[in-house]
Image (cartoon, rainbow, N blue to C red):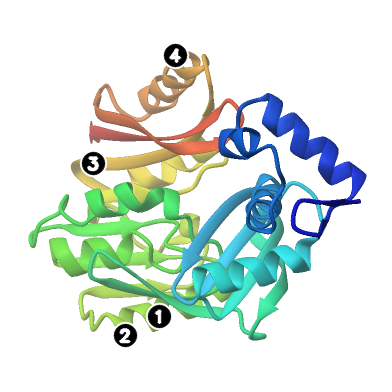
Amino acid sequence: MCYGEGTFISKEELKTYLILILQVQLKHIYKQKVITQKNLKLFRARMKFENIKKLEKLGRILIVELRNDENKHEIGKYLLKKYKVDTVILRKKIVGTTRRPVVEILAGKKNTETIYKENGCLYKMDVSKVMFSLGNAFERKRMASISNPSEVVLDMFAGIGQFTIQIAKHSKPRKVIAVDINLDAFKYLKENIILNKLNNVLALNIDNRELPVKKFASRVIMGWLFNTYEFIPHAIRYLKNEGIIHYHTLIREKNEREEIERLYYVLSHYSKDFEIVYKRIVKSYAPRVNHWVFDIYIKV
């Protein structure tokens, strides 16, 4: 079908187009009462974006999550041009306990490695092998100013160093012990320590429940979201006589009180002197599920 300036549009596109007009989402087109080439281009771009669930730009790579695979390569080419990146990658899902992304390159260079800069820190990563959430940016910035040169900090789930790098570079604690069991994440953790010229970080590729020493840390970061309470006994074992635990977890909306009660119950097995001194929602994780962080002062 041909309308306006000889522009071709399918019946399905026209149907959706008219629905948008009725919803007063394209008022200027309605007033013109004509579908021009320019307006159709805007409309088709809009329809592309309606299939997009999420966009994240990490350095020269744009990661997209789609509602379905329809026109995925066309969308990739469109995003490549619009955001002026080297590569557009579709993240299909995240699998396993190591949270490994399953991805597909939609457009641009066949490259999945990038360097992302945030708050004066550089993060090198392969987005097909490790996760890095832009939604944690505020929490990373908070960690940048939370420690001091007298502390030893343990990052139990360091990943590529999302918290470790910020705290080591800006807070300058005496030492950060950064632990991760994932070999891919550990590889980039080591590279990021070098990239940021840090000499106060010790990286360990072991199970964080098997550290050979105890009672050495002033502060413990528990940046894991799944059944994190199971690791509390180990975090407490690594603390000195008193300290702070930064406890991350997922909580379904309206279940906050229940989760806090469970946290208090677990902590009470190891100490009678503890207090949640700070709490906040870090980001939305899924429909009606939020990522929370709790700062817990505890004497052991």
Mark whose residue sits in front, 3 or 1: 1
Crowding near the residue tagged with mark 1, few <14, some 14–19, many ≥20 C-alpha atoms within 10 Å: some
Q: CA distance from mark 3 to mark 2?
A: 27 Å
Return the residue at label 1: 190
Please state the total of marks drawn on the protein image: 4
- Relative depth, front residue between 163 and 63: 63
What whole-number distance in Å separates the C-alpha atoms at marks 3 and 1? 25 Å
Mark 3 Cα shell of 10 Å, populated few (<14), some (14-19), many (≥20): many
Relative height, residue 94 to residue 196 (above, below): above
Give the labeled residue for mark 4.
Answer: 257
Name the spot of residue 255 as percent of width and height, x first. Answer: 52, 16
Mark 3, secondary structure of its residue: strand
Query: Is disc 1 placed on a helix, strand or loop?
Result: helix
Residue nearest the viewer, comparing 11 with 66 = 11
Instruction: Check disc 2 and report the residue beneath it.
Output: 194
Picture residue at 64% right of the left edge, 51% below the top: 39
Q: Residue at image x 49%, y 74%?
A: 186
Q: In the rendering, at what x and y percent does residue 264 appear? A: 38, 21
Q: Residues within 10 Å of mark 2 (few under 14, many from 20)?
A: few
Amino acid type, mark 4: Arg
Visible residue check, residue 229? yes
Quarter of the image containing the C terminus? top left
Q: Marks 2 and 4, Cα distance to the nearest angstrom? A: 42 Å
| Residue 173 appears in view | no
Judging by the rendered image, the residue that carries numbered circle 3 is: 244
Question: What residue type is disc 2 on?
Answer: Ile
> Label 4: how many residues lie within 10 Å, few (<14), some (14-19) or many (20+)?
few
Q: Would you say the residues marked 4 and 3 are in contact, meaning their CB atoms lie under 8 Å apart? A: no
